[in-house]
Image (spheres, helix red, strand yellow):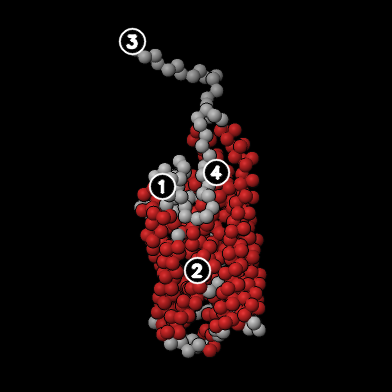
Amino acid sequence: MHPASPTPPSPGTPSEPSPARGSAGRYVGPVLLVLAIAAIGLLWAKWYPYTLKTIGLAESGTWDGSVLSDAAVDAPTWWRGGWDFLVTYTLAIWKALLVALVISAAVQAFLGPERLARLISGGRARSGAAAASGRADDRGAARAALAGLPAMMCTCCTAPVVVGLRRAGVPVRAATAFWLANPVLNPAVIVFLAIIGPWQWAATRVVVGIALVAVAVVVAGRLAGRGAQIGSPSGPAGAGTERVAIAATPVSPRTVQPGAASAGGIASQTSASAPLRFLRELGRLAVRLVPEYLGIVFVVGVLLHLGGWRLGAIDWSVAAVLLFALIAVLMVIPTAGEIPVLLALAALGADPWAEGVALICLSAVSLPSLVMVGRALTWRASAGIAGVVLAAGLAAGALLAL
């Protein structure tokens, strides 16, 4: 007996909805929502203010900012130095920090591992050895770095987004690329440098900045190792993989049994719970990261006051340049905060090596941002990134000294 052939559907019979079309709809909608949230926030906090700043610089040719550390050094007591530095820095970056928290919460609440993997790496989220080895991470890291360029955030403001990316399953390499590209390759700051300083500043920032991001991505991926494997989105963490090494529980996609609900039902359930997830993630990030940020920035201000470091009093020996590089890696500044430092160094006739250190090390990372992303990228990777930044600052100094 021959098996019966399946009866073809009649022309009048309605066909089942295409799984591909339903999947694409559930992917595109949340992505567009997150992009809209990011665009509105960045327009308010970054794009519009920087447009006005660029126009003002082109007309006047002078920079109206001051060296941020002076707020701590000039204070009468150590606790006042920490407080004044904290207030000055927070007033400079609070808009960007708020936008970063909102974007991070939106990524976790509306995207999740599957959508984010498709957006960054162009495929499904990987698990196990594939995630740890980084064999297919180069394309994702490049996309993440490009995504960081229009964000134009300082290192501290980018840190909450990096935590959100890791919680959503983004590999260490891609998260590192996004984190460093934001401050180091910030197009607005590069334009400011080209307008206000010698062309060598902008050129060195671009050349060394690209090399810094590329090397740091590789170093972070290798140092993170298996301790930073991402959980498989297709199954619970622990089934042959390890969870992201941060305090909060990673976001996992919903599992729906075949036939349990229609595509429209799934979409409506997700839409109903997404705002609650967004508020929960925003509160969790704020409670965890903001106090951490406030405390560490206060400590940095206290250390600056106790050290009494003033650029004009430094004798730029080899030891002084190395010490300045170490301080610059840990120092916290707002976006473009390195420009008044560079202008002060140039006016004082400082060594070009010191200018190179300030050009790269001040903006790339800081003690608060390293601490905030330490659990997300692993502490080994964060320390390795700091070392790469210090070496890149010295390389920039060598280029400027030619």
State the SS at label 2: loop
- The CA distance from mark 2 to mark 1 is 30 Å
Q: So how many labels did they put on this image?
A: 4
State the SS at label 4: helix
Q: Residues within 10 Å of mark 2 (few under 14, many from 20)?
A: many
The reply to whether the C-beta atoms of the residues labelled 3 and 4 are less than 8 Å apart is no
Which residue position holds label 3?
1
In the picture shown, does residue 191 fall above or below 149? below
Q: Position of residue 153 (x, y in %)?
A: 56, 64
Q: Residues within 10 Å of mark 1 (few under 14, many from 20)?
A: many
- The CA distance from mark 4 to mark 1 is 28 Å
Kind of residue sitting beneath label 1:
Thr
Q: Nearer the viewer, mark 4 or mark 2?
A: 2
Left or right of 49? Residue 369 is: left
- Between residue 191 and residue 160, name the one nearer to us: 160
Q: Nearer the viewer, mark 2 or mark 1?
A: 1
Q: In percent of the image, x 47 and y 52: which residue is there?
A: 244
- The CA distance from mark 2 to mark 3 is 74 Å
Q: Residues within 10 Å of mark 3 (few under 14, many from 20)?
A: few
Kind of residue sitting beneath label 4:
Val
Which residue position holds label 2?
365
Q: In percent of the image, x 58 and y 61: which residue is there?
A: 289
Q: Position of residue 180 (x, y in %)?
A: 48, 64
Q: Position of residue 96 (x, y in %)?
A: 61, 63
Where does the C terminus fall, quadrant-wise? bottom left
Mark 2 and mark 1 lie on one chain; the one further toward the N terminus is 1
Which residue position holds label 4?
28
State the SS at label 3: loop
